[in-house]
Image (cartoon, rainbow, N blue to C red):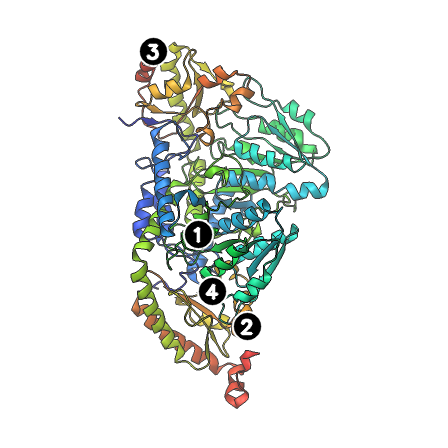
Amino acid sequence: MRPPIYLDYAATTPVDPRVAEQMCRYLTRDGVFGNPSSRSHAFGRAAAQAVEAARAQVAALVNADPDEIVWTSGATESNNLALKGAAHYYSKKGRHLVTCKTEHKAVLDPCRQLEREGWQVSYLEPEPTGLVNLDHLAAALRPDTVLVSIMQVNNETGVIQELAAIGRLTRERGVLLHVDAAQSAGKVSIDLAALPVDLMSFSAHKVYGPKGAGALYVRRRPKVRLEAQLHGGGQEHGLRAGTLATHQLVGMGAAVAIAQAEMAAEAARLLALRERLWQGIQAIEAVYLNGDPQRRAPGILNVSFGGVDGEALRAALRDIAVSSGSACTSAAAEPSHVLLALGRSKPLARSALRFSLGRFTTLDEIDYTVARVQAAVTQLRELSPLWERYLEGMGNVWEQ
Amino acid sequence: MTPIYLDCNATTPLEPEVRDILLRFLTEEFGNEGSRTHEYGVRAKQAVQKARDQVAVVVAAKRDEVIFTSGATESNNLAILGLRAAGREQGRRHVIITAIEHKAVLEPCAALEQEGFEVTRLPVTAGGFVDPAAIRAALRPDTLLVSIMQVNNETGVRQPIEAIAEILKDHAAYFHTDAAQGFGKDIETLRNPRIDLISISGHKIYAPKGIGALVMRRRGYDRPPLRPLVYGGGQERGLRPGTLPVALIVALGAAAEIAVRDHVKRRQACQKIRERALQALAPLDPKLTGDQSQVMDHVLNLAFPGLDSEALMVALKDFIAISNGSACTSSSYTPSHVLKAMGMDDDEANACVRISWRHLTPAVDWDAVANRIRTLR
């Protein structure tokens, strides 16, 4: 049996063979395997050089200074370091944070923890498009607000927030802005010299780099300070202790360099594929596109199907690897908190499929997927009591 | 001329057998183990569970007692700072460590101290190990945690873990050991059921950097009451969220299994290297650091009277790559806190170099090394 068609690139991506080849040079005895902190011999110094070259690659992706990049084990750790690190460091200024209900758990859960520690957090309701309402944001800012955290691209819907406008607002009010860029870095262009963003989280494994590597951008001018979350060893200027994993960081650097070089062409290719997928699915009756029709990252399509149970639909599409939402919460049977926040009903949120396309997605795969989805939805609706009531003229019964 | 790498306590190259496994899970078996809706995720999950078993079996633990982390530093932080909340709630705010712990234990303990905990830092003997009787004397009813490293990273001296476990038999304190330097090398010690928490590093046992584990042994049905340091996503029972780095985990599992399989062979190979080194260097009258009966087979910490470690490392740089202490502190010029704790003065400590090798270390021309040292005198 051939493996399922992989359309879950937003959950994770394979390491690009070009990246894997680079990584292999930093592992074994014939490669650069030293500890980058070993200053007493050439093995260590060569590893340190490789780590710094990779840091420069990540900095170049977002037009930042290499000194502004702190390595972490991934975007979850980056988000925790940004949120808890800033909240603790600036606790004398105030204990209030603002975020949005559609953020990833790696932002929402640290916020919950800070609430347990005595902070207050305002959770903004997004517009039905998924976009943050700037007036609501402005109204939520208080004199004791320390930080606003808004993701750039939503992992479930692909919706792109208006960072420039959000940043102007936070900068005006002297509030830090953190951005979870796990889904956007390497896919949409980011210029941190122009964007008023203070902290930004990156993940390697969403852009064909290895799992277990990430980074946090920490602005130097004006300087943002953080309280370290891991202690011991002094690496990363004391902000993040632990032996630097040379091959992982080299992998992340190589991955973002490729993503940057190929970004424009790849975005156009993915957009065309995604449009073709959407055209095919749109031909089915009673389907709902989740998220803003325009402001979306090119690789993501999130669709709800009226009168269809999502679980049954995914089971019927076993030869296509798609998800109902975030991998981090896919164990839970709960409907997506993101889609509910966009105002979708529980039945529609439960019926959603997230298709996420990537570097190795082909036209044939898309056409096959369209045919399979059309057939599966038709078949499932034949057995659906909701669909029967719809056909009886009772309207869009799944919207309640 | 490329020197021979003799700094295996700082990091080790990847085990050749592990490389192919790592590569396969990077590019082919690339699923997110959190993805429950398709085969890619299911396969990743299975691979992670197998690796969990492979790590658990080394220390006679159960699969669900293994939490994967980014390395021993994170494991140490999680073990120590993770107990903070329980200590506060139970009014147990006393911690016992030794003066020779790694920074990744010393610094989280210093963080606890700033928050009102009391930390007892026990001295060590001239032999480089803590006296178990000192631990007995330091124990208090409110002692929350005893954290003693299994093997010191600078001297290679084994700490009396079994004797400490015996002393702690009737005490409620959690017993943590930083096993970064001993996991998979000094195997029997870590199987002691009294050890509650074990920090493991991948890159010290020929697995990749960036992966480690914390073993949390249950007492009966009770898990050590750790709270997470990182939040979001729910992975590792919520104790260590974040997408699991499947390739790194699988590589650690494989390296752990090989470590047990090849244990005796590796020790013998390391002993031979040690004998040859000592034979060649003996005429130079080196001063060996630490109680040699307790030193691991792959480590030699020594000084040549009258020679400074910096001068020695520079003079030998074409022959062998060695260090004068922990890589984590090798950028600072302060004398080693470990050696000072063993009673050395600054000059004595600054004279010491650490030589550490592995079973696959190629033959070193020890006579050439000895001759080079002779010319320095």
Q: Marks 4 and 2, how far apart in space?
A: 14 Å
Q: Is residue B163 left or right of residue B269?
A: right
Query: Badge 4 local density, few (<14 within 10 Å), some, or many (20+)?
Result: many
Q: Chain of mark 1?
A: A
- Which residue is identified by label 1? A202
Q: Nearer the viewer, mark 4 or mark 3?
A: 4
- Residue B13 vs B238, above or below: the answer is above
Q: Secondary structure at mark 1?
A: strand
- Which residue is identified by label 3? B374
The reply to whether the C-beta atoms of the residues labelled 2 and 1 are less than 8 Å apart is no
* Circle 2: residue type: Gly
Q: Nearer the viewer, mark 1 or mark 4?
A: 1
The image shows residue A120 at horizontal and vertical percentages of 64, 55
* Circle 3: residue type: Arg
**Dot label at residue A343:** 2
Q: Secondary structure at mark 2?
A: loop
Q: Earlier in the sequence, mark 1 or mark 4?
A: 4
Furthest residue toward bottom: A392
The image shows residue A146 at horizontal and vertical percentages of 58, 52
Q: Chain of mark 2?
A: A
* Circle 1: residue type: Phe
Q: Chain of mark 3?
A: B
- Which residue is identified by label 4? A156
Q: Secondary structure at mark 3?
A: helix
At horizontal 58% and vertical 59% (from top left) the residue drawn is: A141
Number of numbered labels in the structure image: 4
Q: Secondary structure at mark 4?
A: loop
